[in-house]
Image: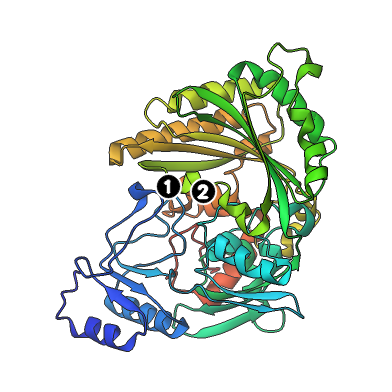
């Protein structure tokens, strides 16, 4: 039902919350997201200041029969962080406290990556944080957490040591190895299934003050040489090295291949690492060098800002993830062709191969955390970006992106082809919760244990927006 401004229950909620409570038309009402086509007009938006505000919002929503969603950074193309009911926006809960001696950061879940990196580096430390400045630490960590520290320190969720969470009944509880350890296990990849996480305790690690970053731009005719060069580099890739190999239209509207590389090292080591990509002559091709090069030693606090151009792209957006274990010229060329077709109606579309060193994540047993994707796959981001925001365009883009996902993984193993892609890239599947088909698929052998955790902490399935787990019978 629609709640008018005179509703006494809503007035009580407004008066009792330290944060903001808004309806459509109120000053401060903001249901915006990175992908405007993934927003839903919410009847009420609560922007809490603390866990108590969240507890009040949950109790109010349940009493009024309103569905609940939680928005952190809002950096997704799914409607998992949107609802026509009550939206809890974490955008004011961004406080960060560093225990320097214990090397633990206590970070409110609405804090964005750039805020996390800027604060932790003051102590010569870094969190296992993502590559996008506008992603919140909460959603990122609870959904796995890939980033430049993956090779050295593992997934963000594997570095989660504690959490404060508001449950479906409004209780505020702690999760750690000594208190509700089953809940902590479930939060390490189980996303928003168990409540609203207000603060995370994450391991911090020694971090040098800067890193070496490059961007090299190439012509389509250089694809074959690039694939050979990347595969040679992969054979000797170090744990602190990452390459993103992507396709994008340039400002001139023409298609280009791009290498974005980062070495968490001094400039000299970084230059030696990426030198192979500056001259492809060893592969006997006509076009030897990239047509554009950028090389810079970047303060660590600025590393997550390197991709900021993506945060301001206009228009509708639909994204998905793919997994592959075969990367060769034919696969890349066919993927290029499928990507280029999407750019006709979505001109900012991207296809990005993410070459993380994932040995650290893969060496942990699959049941060490809820996150079940520990195979040695290459992660691929597929995005139709920049189309108009209509429902028709969104549906068409979804079909095109899922086709791109199929093309990308077509020459890989059955396991890679059947994968839904990286958990935090699972937007096309995350809200299809009429059954738990995709939820079972994404959590694999961990699903039955997650069902037990769900039965204990959210038996009424109040939190059902993202890969919704069904409680054990």
Q: Is residue 246 left or right of residue 238?
A: left
As rendered, which of 468 and 425 lies closer to the eye?
A: 425
What residue is pinned by disc 2? 308
Q: Position of residue 47 (x, y in %)?
A: 37, 73
Q: Is residue 146 left or right of residue 276?
A: left
Instruction: State the image quarter where residue 104 is shown.
Output: bottom right
Cα gap from disc 2 to disc 1, whole angstroms: 7 Å
Describe the element under mark 1 as helix, strand or loop: helix
Dot 1 surroundings within 10 Å: few (below 14), some, or many (20 or more)? few
**Observer able to see residue 371:** no
Describe the element under mark 2 as helix, strand or loop: helix
Q: Position of residue 446 (x, y in %)?
A: 66, 60
Q: Give the label on residue 466, or none.
A: none
Name the residue: 45% across, 68% down.
463
User: Looking at the picture, does residue 368 appear above or below residue 328?
Assistant: below
Assign the N terminus to one quadrant of the image.
bottom left
């Amino acid at each position: 039902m629609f709640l008018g401004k005179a509703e006494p229950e809503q007035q009580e909620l407004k008066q009792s919350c330290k944060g903001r409570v808004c309806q459509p038309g109120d000053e401060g009402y903001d249901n915006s997201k990175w992908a405007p086509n993934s927003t839903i007009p919410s009847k009420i938006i609560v922007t809490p200041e603390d866990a108590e505000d969240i507890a009040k919002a949950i109790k109010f929503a349940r009493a009024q029969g309103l569905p609940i969603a939680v928005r952190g950074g809002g950096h997704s193309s799914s409607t998992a962080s949107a609802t026509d009911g009550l939206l809890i926006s974490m955008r004011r809960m961004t406080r960060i406290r560093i225990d320097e001696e214990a090397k633990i950061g206590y970070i409110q879940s609405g804090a964005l990556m750039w805020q996390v990196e800027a604060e932790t580096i003051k102590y010569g430390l870094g969190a296992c944080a993502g590559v996008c400045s506008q992603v919140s630490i909460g959603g990122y960590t609870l959904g796995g957490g890939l980033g430049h520290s993956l090779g050295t320190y593992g997934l963000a969720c594997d570095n989660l040591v504690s959490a404060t969470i508001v449950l479906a009944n409004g209780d505020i509880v702690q999760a750690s190895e000594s208190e509700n350890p089953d809940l902590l296990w479930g939060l390490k990849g189980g996303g928003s299934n168990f409540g609203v996480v207000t603060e995370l305790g994450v391991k911090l690690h020694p971090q040098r003050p800067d890193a070496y970053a490059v961007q090299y731009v190439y012509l389509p005719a250089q694809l074959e040489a690039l694939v050979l060069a990347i595969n040679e580099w992969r054979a000797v890739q170090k744990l602190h090295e990452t390459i993103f190999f992507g396709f994008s239209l340039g400002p001139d509207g023409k298609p280009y291949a791009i290498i974005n590389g980062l070495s968490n090292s001094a400039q000299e080591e970084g230059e030696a690492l990426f030198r192979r990509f500056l001259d492809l002559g060893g592969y006997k091709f006509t076009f030897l060098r990239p047509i554009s090069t950028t090389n810079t030693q970047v303060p660590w606090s600025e590393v997550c800002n390197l991709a900021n151009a993506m945060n301001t792209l206009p228009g509708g957006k639909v994204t998905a993830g793919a997994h592959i274990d075969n990367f060769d010229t034919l696969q890349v060329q066919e993927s290029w062709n499928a990507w280029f077709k999407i750019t006709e109606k979505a001109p900012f579309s991207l296809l990005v191969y993410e070459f993380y060193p994932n040995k650290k994540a893969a060496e942990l047993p699959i049941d060490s955390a809820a996150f079940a994707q520990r195979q040695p796959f290459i992660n691929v981001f597929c995005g139709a970006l920049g189309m108009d925001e209509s429902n028709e365009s969104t549906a068409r883009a979804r079909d095109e992106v899922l086709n791109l996902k199929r093309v990308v993984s077509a020459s890989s193993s059955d396991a890679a082809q059947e994968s839904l892609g990286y958990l935090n890239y699972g937007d096309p599947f995350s809200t299809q919760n009429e059954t738990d088909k995709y939820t079972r698929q994404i959590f694999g052998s961990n699903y039955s244990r997650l069902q037990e955790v769900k039965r204990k902490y959210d038996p009424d399935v109040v939190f059902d927006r993202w890969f919704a787990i069904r409680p054990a019978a």
